[in-house]
């Protein structure tokens, strides 16, 4: 797929910059499929601001996991 994008704008975390391995994961078809799955099911049909997808949620989770690992590595060494 190779989107060539190495950072995404997130409404909560600002810009999320991806490492090459993370980008390789995001570029897979299963991960891209998450763009079509709504985090809040059919809520977006009633509340237009509820346009959250599993893709955006997963990017945020990946970002937080990266931050946690980076802090643990710095603490460990």
Image: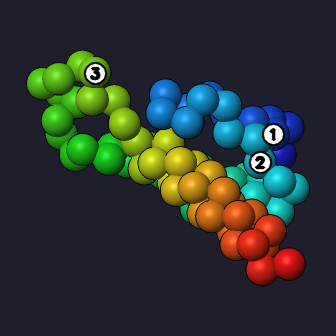
- Tell me if label 1 and label 2 are in contact, CB under 8 Å: yes
Give the residue number, with chain letter if any, for mark 1. Answer: 6
Q: Which residue is mark 2?
A: 18
Name the residue furthest left. Answer: 46
Image height of 29 relative to 10, above or below = below
Helix, strand or loop at label 2? It is loop
First of labels 1, 2 by sequence position: 1
Residues at marks 3 and 1, CA–CA distance in whole angstroms: 26 Å
The residue sitting at 76% across, 41% down in the picture is 17
Return the residue at label 3.
49
State the image coordinates of residue 31 (x, y, percent, origin top left). Answer: 59, 57
N-term mark: 3 or 1: 1
Q: Residue at x 49, y 28 (%)?
A: 11
Q: Nearer the viewer, residue 11 or 53?
A: 11
Q: Single out the residue that lies furthest toward the bottom.
A: 76
Which quadrant of the figure has residue 29?
bottom right
Instruction: Left or right? Give the position of 53 relative to 21.
Output: left
Position of 73 relative to 41 (above/below): below
| Quarter of the view holding residue 49 | top left
Image coordinates for residue 19, horizontal then vertical, percent: 83, 54
Residue 51 visible here: yes
**Residue at position x 38%, y 48% in the image:** 37
């Amino acid at each position: 797929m190779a989107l060539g994008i190495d950072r995404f704008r997130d409404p909560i975390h600002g810009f999320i910059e991806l490492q090459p391995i993370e980008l390789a994961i995001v570029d897979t078809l299963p991960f891209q499929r998450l763009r079509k799955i709504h985090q809040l099911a059919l809520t977006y049909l009633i509340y237009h601001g509820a346009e959250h997808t599993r893709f955006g949620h997963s990017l945020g989770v990946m970002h937080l996991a990266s931050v946690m690992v980076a802090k643990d590595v710095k603490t460990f060494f």
